[in-house]
Image (cartoon, coloured by chain):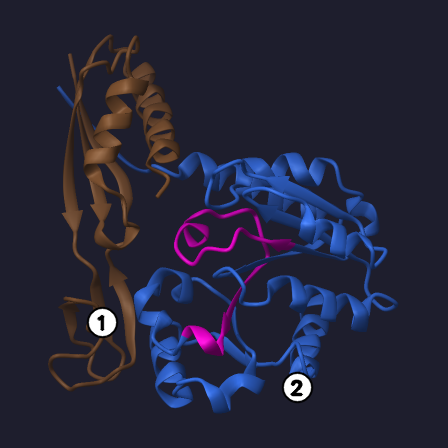
Chain colours: A brown, B blue
Amino acid sequence: MHEMAITRHLIQLVQAHASEANTSKVRQINLIVGQLSGYVCECVQTYFDLLAKGTIMEAARLSFEIVSSTGQCRDCNETFEVEQSKWICPKCNGTRIQLAGGNELLVDSIEVE
Amino acid sequence: MEIKVLSNILGANDQLAEENRKLLDSHETMMVNLMSSPGAGKTSLILKTIEALKNEIRIGVIEGDVSSSIDAERISKEGVPALQINTGGDCHLDANMIRSAIANMPLEDIDLLFVENVGNLICTAEFSLGEHKRVVLTHTPEGDDKPHKYPLMFTNTDVVIINKTDLMPYVSFNTDSYYAAVQGLNEDVQIIQVSCTTGEGVDQWLSWIRQQLT
């Protein structure tokens, strides 16, 4: 996966918000990452530790809130967590399932001095 | 102190994509992002399209690959403008790469611009390029279980093409369950079955293109 590219985008985004807030130090970055995005959080942390050196977010901690893959049945509207790639409605056994969550890639908030 | 951000990490890419789109609109150029796994037939489909439509529609192609210019060379031989992007390792094209590419293409002379994305069903789904339409090409030998394995790709697409229908008798491909899976993920999608080898179904694809340009 392209965790390095994502980490670069993450740093640019946080830099922009930190500058707006006139802060000199970012201590923690809280991320929301959907399961379907496929990103390996440990890889993001590793790249972040390298790329953030010398910036106001050097040594900041990354916190990951993982959102499960969620499906919604088009036949009975049941919403459920998709486990082991089973896209079958647990209520009505329908197979017409739309994606209802799990592809997020967000910075939720940052903690600054 | 906590500062709420609640922003998409790829927001900067989305913004560049929007700028690409505005530039394309100013030239009345429709961009189609064509995605698939490697070997599904993207280049064959583009070549078939050029063969059928080049005297009717002005076509251009941006080719995306990790390396080599094999595909752009094949397209150029057909007499249409083709530009190769080598990502040098990136598994997808992004809006910034397309921005540079379209700055070097004669958009004023192109009605339909294909982007043949890097062969990949995961990463290409995540990066908007500024395209007007997204087309996913699947092929019968890869099996009928791909929609649920790559749900994001199939959710965010306008057309799903099933290529290599001529191989259906020799591979395991359940069309009914495939359609149910795709239409479950994406109610509005159009599914077109083709064989770039025999030409079967290609007319339906060409009709779809013509409809988008009217």
Q: Is residue B214 visible?
A: no
- Which quadrant is home to the N terminus of chain B? top left
For disc 2, the marked residue is B200
Question: Horizontal and vertical percent for residue B173?
Answer: 41, 84
Q: Residues within 10 Å of mark 1 (few under 14, many from 20)?
A: many
Q: Residue at x 41, y 38 (%)?
A: B11
Q: Residues within 10 Å of mark 2 (few under 14, many from 20)?
A: some
Q: Is residue A23 above or below residue B210?
A: above
Which one is in front, B106 or B14? B106
Please state which amino acid type lies under the numbered disc 1: Gln
In front: label 1 or label 2: 2
Q: Residue at x 20, y 83 (%)?
A: A76
Q: Quadrant for residue B150, please give it.
A: bottom left
Furthest residue toward right: B55
Tell me the subunit letter for badge 2. B
The tag on residue A72 is 1
Q: Is residue A30 visible?
A: yes
Please state which amino acid type lies under the numbered disc 2: Glu
- Which quadrant is home to the C terminus of chain B? bottom right
Q: Quadrant for residue A13, please give it.
A: top left
Which one is in front, B72 or A13? B72
The tag on residue B99 is none
Q: Secondary structure at mark 1?
A: strand
The reply, left or right, for residue B115 in relation to residue B148 is right
Residue B200 colored magenta?
no
Question: Horizontal and vertical percent for residue B153?
Answer: 41, 61
The stretch of residues the image draws in magenta is: B115-142
To the question of a shared chain for discs 1 and 2, the answer is no
